[in-house]
Image (tube, rainbow, N blue to C red):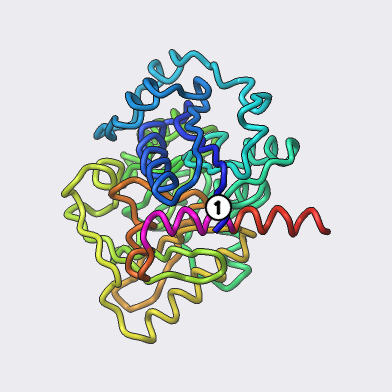
Amino acid sequence: MEKLRVAVLFGGTSSERDVSIASGSQVVKALRAAGHDVIAVDTATGVLGPAQEQQLLTAGVAPAPPEESALEALSGGGANLLQSGELNSVDVVFLALHGGSGENGTLQALLDLTGLPYIGSGVLGSAVAMDKDIAKRLMLVSGVPTPRWLMAPADPNAVGEEIGWPAIVKPNKQGSTVGLTIVREPAGLQPAIELAYKHDDEVIIEEFIPGRELTVPILGDEPLPVGEIIVEREIFDYETKYQPGMAQEIFPADLTGAQVVEVQRLALATHRALKLGGYSRIDFRMAQDGRFWCLEANTLPGMTAASLFPKGAAAAGMTFPQVVDRICRLAIEEHQRRRRV
């Protein structure tokens, strides 16, 4: 296989910075293990030298997202990143970013302008999947069940009548359950909305579906084995996701053959409806009556040691270096296809 020169972009200034750094660390190691040349880049500060890389890429994920003040204190040395001569020489850009401009289509648009191939979804798919309200509308018209929802501000009576209690309140364009609250009664609605507004300018109020937490990784246009996340808590929250031992993740999930076929069908339908590309991870709840409800689509799923996508790929017989190599080559193929159009 042809050796590639890959720039891995991670970090940044979103509330998911720590998770992104952890993903970037694993991706850098895996790409080097696959025999590729790798440039490590923190989009908040710029291209990393060996000492900076060693220091940053050995950090773990804290139990809570970084404070806003800590994010604001970053130097912003990555502002002219795309003008870097080092980036212009790469074969592909691997985005290990989560949340913010790295996942919502903004960086994807800039990379399109530079002509650099990059992994994952394009501008449209990235923007649509990040906006939960728009994504859920597309799911419905594509025949994919998704929990009922309202956008804030909303009257507690309307929430009770249209959604019911408990309800999930969360930022409309945020990941890793940052700013999420389970609201059990009308009195808790406004404080939860105010918390969510600290992380986004739009807030979504969603029906809570009790049941099993499932996830379907997609690589290329093929679903990988379905996984199940078993947690002590009602939701797979930030701490549970990224702290070792907080959740049990089972691949493949204990489902019947018919259930696997159905949830994979819905996952692929979601991936296509939102115009996602390269790879994604589609999350579901399986209700007590056996119905599947799509919660959201992740265009740049986590690549940490505890992340679900690598575990799903492992269940399909792929090593992590093979996974990241495949993702890079899919990106180059897609870039070449677009240039021919």
Q: Is residue 22 magenta?
A: no
Which quarter of the image is occupied by the C terminus?
Answer: bottom right
The answer to whether residue 109 is left or right of residue 37 is: right
Residue 101, how many percent across, how many down? 57, 34
Question: Circle 1: is it few (<14), some (14-19), or many (20+) Cα within 10 Å?
Answer: many
Q: Which residues are magenta?
A: 319-329
Using the rendered image of the protein, determine whether residue 108 is visible from the camera's viewpoint: yes
Residue 95, how many percent across, how many down? 53, 42
From the image, give the main secondary structure of the stretch colored magenta.
helix
- Relative to 314, residue 18 above or below: above
Image quadrant assignment for residue 25: top left
Using the rendered image of the protein, determine whether residue 184 is visible from the camera's viewpoint: no
- Residue that carries the numbered disc 1 in the rendered image: 328
Toward the viewer: 212 or 322?
322
Query: Residue shown at 28%/67% (left/top)?
Result: 212
Q: Is residue 322 magenta?
A: yes
Q: Report helix, strand or loop for mark 1.
A: helix
Residue 98, how many percent across, how many down? 46, 40
Toward the viewer: 35 or 232?
35
Image quadrant assignment for residue 285: bottom left
| Three-letter amino acid code at the position of disc 1 | Cys
Query: Residue shown at 54%/32% (left/top)?
Result: 201
- Relative to 83, residue 188 above or below: below
The answer to whether residue 162 is left or right of residue 247 is: right
- Relative to 49, residue 23 above or below: below
Query: Residue shown at 54%/16% (left/top)?
Result: 77
Query: Residue shown at 30%/72% (left/top)?
Result: 252
Q: Residue furthest right?
A: 341
- Relative to 147, residue 61 above or below: above
Which quarter of the image is occupied by the N terminus?
Answer: bottom right
Toward the viewer: 244 or 133?
244
Toward the viewer: 290 or 243?
243
